[in-house]
Every structure is written in C-alpha cells, then in structure tokens.
Image (spheres, helix red, strand yellow):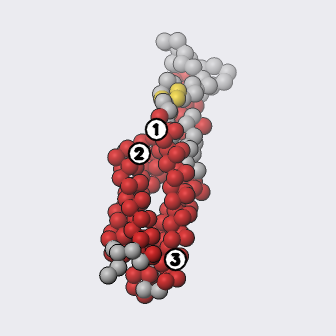
Amino acid sequence: MPVIALITWIVTALGGLYLLAIWLIEYDPDFQRAAATRLPVPVISGHVLFALGGLVVWLLYLITDKEVFAWSTIAILAFVATFGLTMAVRWIGVYRAGPIRAPAPLTTVPPPGAADQRDAWNPTDSWAASAAASAGRQGRPGELAVPPERHFPVSVVIAHGVFAVTTIVLVLLTVLGVGES
C-alpha cells in the first residue's frame, strides 16, 4: 500500500503541476485589474511547496521505515489539503461566474479620416497609434476578461482532487497499519 500511495501522489503532483503551468501562463499582473485571480500567490505557493515537501518526506519514510517520517507526512498533508480545499472552493466560484467586460481604454477612436491629423496632445503620433498604445495589454474594448484559473480543464481539476483524496487515504491507512499482514 505505501508504494501505491507513492504512485497516486506522483500522479496527483503531475496533474497539479499541469494546473500550475496553466495558471502561470494565464496570470498577468497588469491585466489583473480587469479580472483578478481568486487564487492568491501565497496559497498556490504554499500548496505546491508543502505537497512536494510531503512527497520527499514520504520517500524518506519508504526508504528508512521510520515512524517519525510517516507521522510528519500526515501533518504535512493536513496543510496541503487545507490549501487545496481553499483553492477548490475559490475555483468553483470562478468557474460558475461569467466573464466580465474589460474596462474600455481611456482614449476613443477618432472619426474616419482623422487618422493622419495631429493635435495638441499628440503632436507627432496619429490617433490610431496613440489609441493602440494606450490600450496596451488591457485588450480590446468589449473583450471579456476572466481570471487565470477559469482556464483550468474541469476534468483535470476533478482528477487532481480524486487522486489527492486517494493519496491521503492510502497514506493514512499505511501509517495506521491497516492492511498489513
């Protein structure tokens, strides 16, 4: 059973790293004014670091067979599960909520034919260039903004949770000595 727990933990970690990669790719601090993430960086970081640390401690238990590592793993998994449940509850709220409209840029597009005109505010640039520059990374007007965790595949989130619960149960049963012959 300890080796099966290790395998489920590794599968859980791979799913979690996939979700972390999606979150890191989609996370843009400049764009967060439009759609702020509901998963704070300290919670995500704590979840990942505790989970990987717990995996190392579990490996130490498997190698040395010392009880202190087994019980340490249980304590670490309590933190991992707390952070994971916190993120799951927050993700459900984001997943159920609809996208929000990005704020419109401060400048508006001038009437047709005014693109080559200069004014007191932009003596060297055209209207179109200044409007595009002011929009920056905020996106186009009317573009829908969503938090980065909205891009998580539901199947991966569910599989990550199921494997995490399975891992916790297997580790707990192993530490309590259930199923030993």
Query: Does the rendering let one see residue 138?
Result: yes
Of labels 2 and 3, earlier in sequence is 3
Name the element at disc 1: helix
Q: Is residue 44 left or right of residue 65?
A: right
Residue 48: percent from left, percent from top: 50, 62
* Name of the residue lying farthest toward the right: 120
- Label 3: which residue? 71
Front residue of this view, candidates 123 and 75: 75
Residue 26: percent from left, percent from top: 46, 45
Q: Residue at x 39, y 74 (%)?
A: 178
Of labels 1 and 3, earlier in sequence is 3
Query: Does the rendering let one see residue 49?
Result: no
Of labels 1 and 2, earlier in sequence is 1
Q: Residue at x 52, y 38 (%)?
A: 93
Amino acid on which the number 3 mark rests in the picture: Trp
Mark 1 or mark 3, whichever is nearer to me: 3
Amino acid on which the number 2 mark rests in the picture: Phe
Q: Which mark is residue 95?
A: 1
Residue 77: percent from left, percent from top: 50, 66
Amino acid on which the number 1 mark rests in the picture: Tyr
Q: Which mark is residue 152?
A: 2
Mark 2 or mark 3, whichever is nearer to me: 3
Q: Quadrant of the N terminus?
A: bottom left
Q: Quadrant of the C terminus?
A: bottom left
Q: Residue at x 50, y 32 (%)?
A: 97
Name the element at disc 2: loop
Do tag 1 and tag 2 residues touch (Cβ < 8 Å)? Answer: yes
140 is higher (above) or lower (below) than 114? below
Do tag 1 and tag 3 residues touch (Cβ < 8 Å)? Answer: no
Residue 102: percent from left, percent from top: 54, 29
Do tag 2 and tag 3 residues touch (Cβ < 8 Å)? Answer: no
